[in-house]
Amino acid sequence: MTEHWTREHAAERLRRPGAHDDKYRRGVLGLRTGSARYPGAAVLGASAAWRTGAGMVRYLPGHDEDPPYGLPAPAAAVLAAHPETVFGPGRCDAWVIGSGTDPAARSALEQSELLELLHGSAPVVVDAGALDLVPRPSADRAPLILTPHAGEFERLWERTMRAPLPREWVARPPADAEAGGNGAAARQEAARRLAERLDATLLLKGSLTLIASPGGRVLSCGPATPWLASAGTGDVLAGILGALVAARSAEVRDDRESLGPLGATAAVLHDAAARTASGDPAATAAGRPITAGDVAQAIPAAWRALV
Ligand SMILES: NC(=O)C1=CN([C@@H]2O[C@H](COP(=O)(O)OP(=O)(O)OC[C@H]3O[C@@H](n4cnc5c(N)ncnc54)[C@H](O)[C@@H]3O)[C@@H](O)[C@H]2O)[C@@H](O)CC1
Ligand SMILES: Nc1ncnc2c1ncn2[C@@H]1O[C@H](COP(=O)(O)OP(=O)(O)O)[C@@H](O)[C@H]1O
C-alpha cells in the first residue's frame, strides 16, 4: 500500500528557523560531489542546498584528475557561484556523495574516504556515481538514503540481488507503470524489496517518485512536471534532500525511518520549484522549458508558496 505524499505533508516537514538558531543548529551539509568531468553537478547541488535553507554548505573536492577542456576544478566552480560555501573538512550533520562522479574514474583514496563516510554516524544521501559503494547492512553503517534513476535502480538491483530485475518489474517503465497501470504496483514492489534488502531508504526517481523505507513504508510523489526531465535536475534534488536531512540530522540518527518523509518532502519541493520556474506554480498550466539551474533558483519561492 503506497501513501501519496502531498504538498501539505511536505510543508509540515520543512523546518523554519527560530530565534535560537544559528548556522550550526540549522544544519551543516557536506558535499562530495562533482568531478573534473562534471563540475556543474557540484554547483547545482551546492546551489540547491543553500536555497533549501542549509545553515552551512561545506564542499570537499574529490581526489581527481586534472579537468579537461579548460574547465575549472569543481571547487573553483562552486566558489564562483556561491562564495558563501566553506571549503575543507569540519563538522557535517549530513552528506551528499556521488552526484557528478564516475565510479570508473574513482581513485583508491577517494573510495576509502567515501567508505569512511558510509560507515560514519552522519546520514548520507547516496547519488549517481557512489551508488555502487553502498555497503551491506551493518551496525556501524550511517543512515542512508539512495537516489537512483531508473537505470541506476536496475544496476543497483542486479548488484544487490545478484539476479536480473524481473521483466515485469523493469524499473524503466512502460508508460503505464508510473501512471497507475499494472506496472505501477510492480515498480512499488521492486522499490520496497530493494529497500528492505539494503536496509536503507530508497528514492526511485521518475515522473512519479517512490520513496521506500527499509521498514516497508512506501510513499509516492507526483506526477511531477515533465519539464523536470532534463540533465542536472537530479543533482538539484540531491542538494535539496541533503539540506533537509542536515536540518534534521539528530532525528534521523534516532530513527532512520524518518528519512522516508524527508525524501518525499524533497521530491515535492523539487517539483514545486520546477513548476514555479516553469511559470506553472499551481500545476494548472502547461509551463515552459526550464534548466536545472532555474529549478535551484526557484526553490525559495516554491518553499514560501508551500508553507
Ligand atoms: N552538469 C553536470 O555536471 C551533470 C552531471 N551529471 C552526472 O553525469 C553522470 C552520469 O549520469 P547519467 O544519468 O547520464 O548516466 P548513467 O551513467 O547513470 O547511465 C545512463 C544509462 O542508464 C540508462 N537509463 C535507464 N533509465 C534511465 C533514466 N531514467 N535516466 C537516465 N538514464 C537511464 C541510460 O539509457 C544510459 O544507458 C552522473 O554522475 C550525474 O550526476 C548529470 O546529472 C547531468 C548534469
Ligand atoms: N517524465 C518526467 N516527469 C517529471 N519528472 C521527471 C521525469 N523524468 C525524470 N524526472 C525527474 O527529473 C530528475 C532527473 O534526475 P536524474 O535522472 O538523476 O538526472 P541527472 O543525473 O541528469 O541530474 C529526477 O528528479 C526525476 O524524478
Image (tube, rainbow, N blue to C red):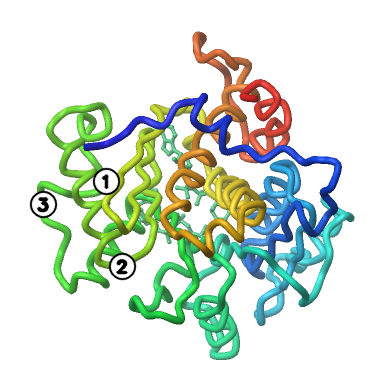
Residue 283 horizontal side relative to residue 200, left or right = right
Q: Is mark 1 within 8 Å of ligand 1?
A: yes
Image quadrant in which you'd find residue 153: bottom left
For the residues labelled 3 and 2, the Cα–Cα distance comes to 21 Å
Precedes in sequence: disc 3 or disc 2: 3
**Image quadrant occupied by the C terminus:** top right
Residue type (three-letter) at the residue carrying disc 1 = Arg
**Image quadrant occupied by the N terminus:** top left
Residue 201 horizontal side relative to residue 280, left or right = left
Precedes in sequence: disc 2 or disc 1: 1
Precedes in sequence: disc 3 or disc 1: 3
Give SS at disc 2. Answer: helix
How many numbered dots are placed on residues in this image?
3
Q: Residues within 10 Å of mark 3 (few under 14, many from 20)?
A: few
Closest to the observer: 65 or 278? 278
Residue type (three-letter) at the residue carrying disc 3 = Arg
What's the residue at 51%, 46% (across, down)?
262
Nearer the camera: disc 2 or disc 1: 2
Closest to the observer: 223 or 254? 254
For label 3, the residue is 167
What's the residue at 40%, 80% (across, down)?
139
* Place of residue 158 in the rendered image (x, y in percent of width and height, measured from the top left): 23, 67
Residue type (three-letter) at the residue carrying disc 2 = Leu
For label 2, the residue is 198
Give SS at disc 1. Answer: loop
* Place of residue 63 in the rendered image (x, y in percent of width and height, measured from the top left): 66, 82
Residue lying farthest right? 83
For label 1, the residue is 172
Vertical relation: 298 (above or below) 95: above
What's the residue at 48%, 70% (across, down)?
130
Give SS at disc 3. Answer: helix
